[in-house]
Amino acid sequence: KLEQQQVTDQNLDGLDVKAIELSRVDFVKTNFGSTTTIRATIVNTSFLNCEFVSAGMSDSGLRIVTFTHCRIGSMGLSDSTLNKITFTDCKIGSLNLRMSRGTELTFSDCIIEEIDAYQMEGKNVTFKNCQIKNLKISDAKLKNCDITQSTVDSIDGLVNAKGLVITH
């Protein structure tokens, strides 16, 4: 368990932890490289100018977490619970949200290659001024998902996209 800490200029590449708890931790200029956490609980935590080459955080719970000016090669949040998560000015290669549940997910000013939200249950998901190459939403249940202020090159799985707002 790690609480009320600031972690700056650290190299955590290769870290492999199970069931870690982070509360009120601020990571600044930290390299997570290829990090794996399973069943993590991350609350009131921020990541500023951090790098994630291949981060796996499956089956985890994240609440009130911010990613700002981060570079993310790939991040797996499959089968996780996500509440009040914000990505601001991030470059994201691949974000795996498969079978996750989320409320109030906000992406602002991000460049995103791919988001895979297969069977995701999401409410109040917003993309503001983002460039998204591929958005996969097959069998997703999205309510109040707004991409009106972003550019999306392709969307897969529009059949069950209830609540998705698209305007031209």
Image (cartoon, rainbow, N blue to C red):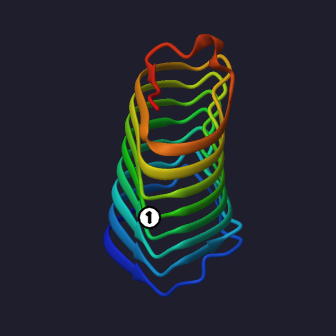
- The residue under the point 35% across, 66% down is 25
- The residue under the point 59% across, 20% down is 140
Neighbour tally class for label 1: few under 14, some 14-19, many 20 plus, Cα within 10 Å: some
Quadrant in the picture for residue 82: top left
Quadrant in the picture for residue 72: bottom right
Looking at the picture, does residue 78 appear above or below residue 29? above
User: In the rendering, at what x and y percent does residue 29 appear?
Assistant: 47, 81
User: In the rendering, at what x and y percent does residue 83 appear?
Assistant: 37, 38
Q: Secondary structure at mark 1?
A: loop
**Considering depth in this image, is 147 or 89 the residue closer to the camera?**
147
Q: Is residue 114 left or right of residue 69?
A: right
- The residue under the point 32% across, 74% down is 5
**Looking at this rendering, what residue extends furthest in the front direction?**
168
- The residue under the point 60% across, 83% down is 11
Q: Is residue 140 left or right of residue 82?
A: right
> Which residue matches tag 1?
89
User: In the rendering, at what x and y percent does residue 52 appear?
Assistant: 62, 67
Looking at the picture, does residue 41 appear above or below residue 165? below
Q: Is residue 49 left or right of residue 5?
A: right
**Considering depth in this image, is 155 or 45 the residue closer to the camera?**
155
**Looking at this rendering, what residue extends furthest in the bottom direction?**
9
Q: Is the N terminus in the top left, top right, bottom left or bottom right quadrant?
A: bottom left
Q: Amino acid at mark 1?
A: Asp
